[in-house]
Each structure stands twice: as C-alpha cells, then as structure tokens.
Amino acid sequence: MPRYIPYLLLLPATVFLIIFFLYPFTQVAIESFTSNGSWSLANFQKASSHWKFGEAFKNTMLLAALVVPIQLAMSLTMATVVQKLQKGRSAILYIFAIPLGISDLAAGLIWLSIFEQSGFLNSILVNMGLIEKPILYLSYQSPWVILFAIMLAEIWRATAIMMVILVAGLGLIPREYGEAAEVFGATRWQRFYKVTLPMLRPSLQTALILRVILAFEVFAVVIALGGTQMPVLMSETFNWQFNLQDRGVAAAYAMVILAVSVVFTLIILRALHVPKEARS
Amino acid sequence: MKSFKPILGAVSGLALMLGAVSAQAEVLFWSTQAQPVEETQKMRDEVVAGFEAGVDYQAPESGPWLTRAQAELSAGSGAVGVLGGLHGDLTAVRGGLADLSDIDISAIPAELAALGKLDTEQQKYIPWMQATFLMVANKKALAYLPEGADLNALTYDQLIDWAKAMAEGEGGPKFGFPAGPKGLKHRFFQGFLLPSYTGSTVNEFRSAEAEEAWGKFRELWQYANPASTNYNFMQEQLVNDEVWLTFDHIARISEAFNTRPDDFVAFPVPAGPKGRGFMTVVAGMGVPETAPDMAEAKALIDYMLKPETQLATLRATNFYPVVSVDMPDDVPASVKASGPAIATMTAAEDALPVLLPMGMGDLNGQFNQVYVDTFEQIILAGREIRPTLEQQAEALRALMDEAQAPCWLPDAPSEGACPVN
C-alpha cells in the first residue's frame, strides 16, 4: 500500500474541519479581540459590564453544577443495569437512548407543553380536583421553578449520551477482574467501587468532558422554557449577535464559553487522570 | 371550444416548464413585516399575487433580514429586489439603498414621504403602510371603569385604578401587558409611557419625571397578570379571556376583533402630565443598489402603492394605507374598531406624537434593549428606580454617541448626537 493513502483518506475530513471549523473559529476569535479595526478588549468590557452577564454566567454554572452530577449518577446506574441484563438488553438500550434522537428545542417544547399554564400538568391537576384553576409555573416570580423545569428537560434529554459511552466502557472491562474480586469475597458494592469504577475511568472522562461542555452550551431548552427570564451564556451570545446586532460582543461571549469549557476539560482530565501504563 | 383543448394543454404544459425559468424573474421581496406565517401567506395570496412578474414574498426575523441585506450589499451583488421594513430597519441599510425619487409618491402625505429620505437628499425608501398601538378592553371590563373616567381621554392614574378595581373584583389580575420575549414592550416605554410623563424619549431619560413614570408603571404592574412576561401577542390572551384590558400594536390585537367582533372595544392610549404620548409606526420599501432588476423592483413598489393593493395589505396585515383610500364596507371588524380609536387618539387635544427611533442603524436593537433592561431591572427584578435610571442613562448616552443619531420627535432637534440630560 502506498504510504500516502492514509493521508489521502484523512484529507476530506481535514479540509472540512479547516473550512467549517478552524476558519470561522479564527474569525470569531479575531472579532472578539478587535474593535474598530484595532486590537482591544472593548468587546469583553462591554459584555461583562452589561447587567445580564453575571446573571448568565451564574445560571450557566449553576445548571451545569446541578445537572451533570445527577446525570452522572443516573447514566452509571442505567449503564450497569443494561450491562447486567441477560435478555432484552438491546431493547432496553434503545428505549433509554430515545431522547438522543430528539433535538434540544423539541425537548424544551415537550416540557413546555407540560409546565405551561394551559399545559398537561395543570390540566391533570385540575381534572383530578387537586387545584381549582391552572397555576402559572414558569413565571418571572418563581425562577426556581423555571430552573427546575430546565433541569428536568436537560436530564431527560442528555443523560443517554453519557450512558451510551459508559455502556461501551463497561463492555471493555474484562470479566476476569470482577470474578477474581468475587473469589476474594468482595461484595457487589466493593466490586463496583474498587474494580469497575477505576477501570471505567477513561470512559467516565470522555462522558464527563462531553457532557460538561454541552452543559455550557445549553440554549434551546432554556429559551423554550424560560424565554428571556433565565439568561445563560449561549442565549446572551445569540441575543448580542441577532437582536442587538453586535458581533464583537457575541464573539466575546463565545470566547468566554470556550475558556470555561477548556478550563473544565483540563480539570476533568486532571481529576480523572489515567496513568500512561493503564491506557490501552 | 373542444378543438382548443390540446392547444390549451400544450400552452399550460409549456407554462409549467417555463415556470422554473420565470421563477428567476420573480422579484424577491425581503421584508421584516407580516411575519406571523398566516400574514405571510396572506401577503403572498392576496396582496402581491396580482403583480405580473411574480413576487417571492419572504418575511424573516429582523436579524437574518439585516444580515442578508448587508451581506448582499457588501458582496456587491444580490438577489433581493425590494427591502421591506420598519423605518428603523431601513435606516440600518441606508447606505446601500438606491434613490427612488423617480417613483410617483404624490398620493402620500408629504411629512410621511419625508421620513423616507432618511436625512439625505434622496428618496431612500417609499412609505408602504403605517400603524400604531391602541388600548383594548373586553366589554366586561367596562363595569370596573373608574367613575368619571372617559374611555377616550383616559389618564395613567385612571388606568391604574381601573386595573386595580378589576383585580380586586375578579379575584385576579385582568390587565395584561406584552412583556414576552417578542412583545413590543420597548415601544410602550419609548413611545407612550416616558413621553407622556417627560415629553421626551431620550433627553429626559433619567429626569425626575421619568422616575415618576416608572413608579406609575410599577404601580400598574401590581395588577398585571404575572404571565405577562410570556405574552408576545395580546390577541390570544384577549380571545381566551385570560386578559380583559391591554395595550398592543393594532396588528397584534386584530384577531381578537375578528374572532369576537362584539366583545371588545378599542380606545386611545392613556395620557400623562405631558400629554397623550403615542408612537406612529411607519413601514417602507427600499431597493438595494444590488437589486437584480431595478426597473422591476420599482414597478413592484408602484404596484404596492395602488389603492386596491393598499386595501389588500390592510386586510392582510392590519397596517393602514399610506395613501388615501375609500374604505369599503366589508373591511374586517378589527379595522372598523381601531379606525375611530386611532382617529380620536391622533386628533386629541393633548396628542403627543412620537416617532420610531431614527438614525440608530444597527444599534437599533441595543437602543431598544436599554428600555427593556430598565424594565427588567426596575419592574421584574425590583431594583431601585433612581440608580437603575442613572446606569441605563449612561448606556443610552454611549449608544447615542456611537450612532451620532440626532434627536427625533418628541425630542427637540439636536446638532449631533441626541443628548441624554
């Protein structure tokens, strides 16, 4: 086989990435650090001095901090359950993975139809005689309910992606380790905690990084359920780009999201460090 | 007749084949107006369908609208034939609009036509249609109208009393306000509330009078349905009886009148100490210099100004004609209801007309955001009025300086950027 074949095969993907990722990315990066044609931090100043910046930053962090741990626990449980099943394994796996096929906007709208004033939740409660008239859940007066609804929608929608990665990871762990531990009298919990979890580290790392980055980019679900009442970094980026027509500030917001993502990726990489010898 | 059939068939077949070709000759009407999909479809079926060369009417959001318009202008070539938009939209692409002075606009009132010059010597856009905002009440709400209050000459204080009486009488707020993400709340603050108290939109933004205006609005807000922050178009809430009293753009309350014509009344907006501030909305049509067929684009504008087209536009969008037309008897209920209310409002002794923001260019969105931010901080987040106004006034001043926009009505003309006192 000629030596250039692998490079040739990589070429289309590389070209694609350069044109549709690297080029626009560089443009955005330059845009964020320029103002009136010269280098400056004016865009970042303008972004951070707006009263919604702090709010958006706080909300984004809060959402990630609340959603990701729950998703981690749930996806681990789901993956273990799927792994243990003798029969109907793929059927359950498919069912668990259904939300993966739904766009985040659709997911937001589904949950909106539940929590709306004229939505499913209210009609059920009214019909059961538990409340007299529909309650306004998603109101500016009760931001915690909006947050809760967004959390629910996010957990429902995006836990499956972690589960799929963890299922694949669990499949890679040789059975012998678990069996050996069992021989030495390890309990189920000990086997999970001392054998499975450490062996699962690389997959956990991937799943967490992917999920945390996606959490910082949360957008459509928030817009659908919270409108402008729950600003997050991504919705503010959109707002500055399209409603306020200031690409520089929008680019600055995008850079903030990038920076936060990079920082958290590094933290996760460090926290779930996989020793070189253990990498297969 | 029979013998013609094959010929007819052949001709229609040929027409179908040519359809693909002639589609290119269609004028692309790229417009921020008539955006709800029903209105867009009405524009296509009932308004522009009569234009011979064919029109592709597209109604994007104003963000994508501007992005494409600017992209085509900076590329030096494009597909858009006619740009439709509000005065402010068109101001944002002022530099790329062709001179339309050769279009006959003698039927349009001079002061309206002058707006289309965008402070230049040329006719940059042709007024297309106009609208304003009104108050609407369910007839059931009239029982709570404060004693001595005249529906046609209401004050903000009476409005507050009215909303309060209704909230207490009905066991829940019946006043609604379009404060949703797409609601036109900023127009209310810019064109109605603030001018009525300060006689100004920009100059007196942080004056003591402005402080009073926001205080009054906070009072009113206590009796507003808390779901108001989800309301974009008030007609839906009026029709399902969630709201009995509201304020909105006439195009956004028309369905209420058209579905339940006997249940609602339209009336002028309230007045404050400085007068009855109201905003007139003007939409216009411009032709980008990059239009593929300049003559065809101008012909389309001519067609849009015909009295019968203007009437069809009124039916489709509830925006009123810019040329004088004889209203037929079969106009929609919303037109019948809002027509007299608009006339009463504009002819009122204390009438204080306010224009849409001008000269803000692509800072238009940020200009509106100043008013929305003020609302969100004072009313929704419950912050103190004075410091919020101070802080937002600085943001407003920075924007005016950046845009170098001179004052517009009701603020007195200024040399250079409109000052924030």
Image: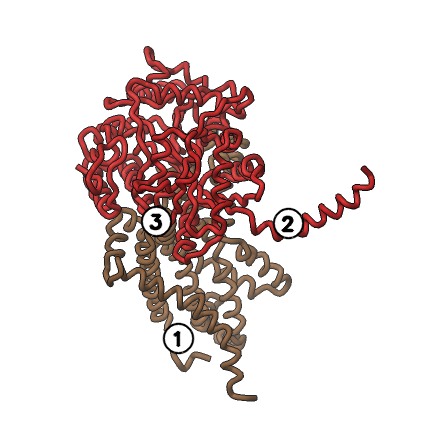
Chain colours: A brown, B red
Name the chain under label 2.
Answer: B
Secondary structure state at the residue bearing disc 3 = helix
Q: What x and y, as percent, mark residue B149?
A: 33, 14
Q: Which residue is mark 3?
A: B95
Q: Are marks 1 and 2 on the same chain?
A: no
Compared across the picture, whether B267 is left or right of A132 comes to left
Residue B265, relative to residue B421: is it above or below? above
Identify the amino acid type marked 1. Val
Q: Nearer the viewer, residue A48 or B193?
A: B193
Q: What x and y, as percent, mark residue B411?
A: 24, 32
Identify the mark at residue A274; answer none if there is no mark: 1
Residue at the front extreme, as displayed: B102
Q: Which residue is mark 2?
A: B19
Give the residue drawn at x 44%, y 50%: A220
Residue A197 visible in rendering: no
Secondary structure state at the residue bearing disc 1 = loop
Q: CA distance from mark 1 to mark 2?
A: 64 Å
Residue B382, relative to residue A75: is it above or below? above
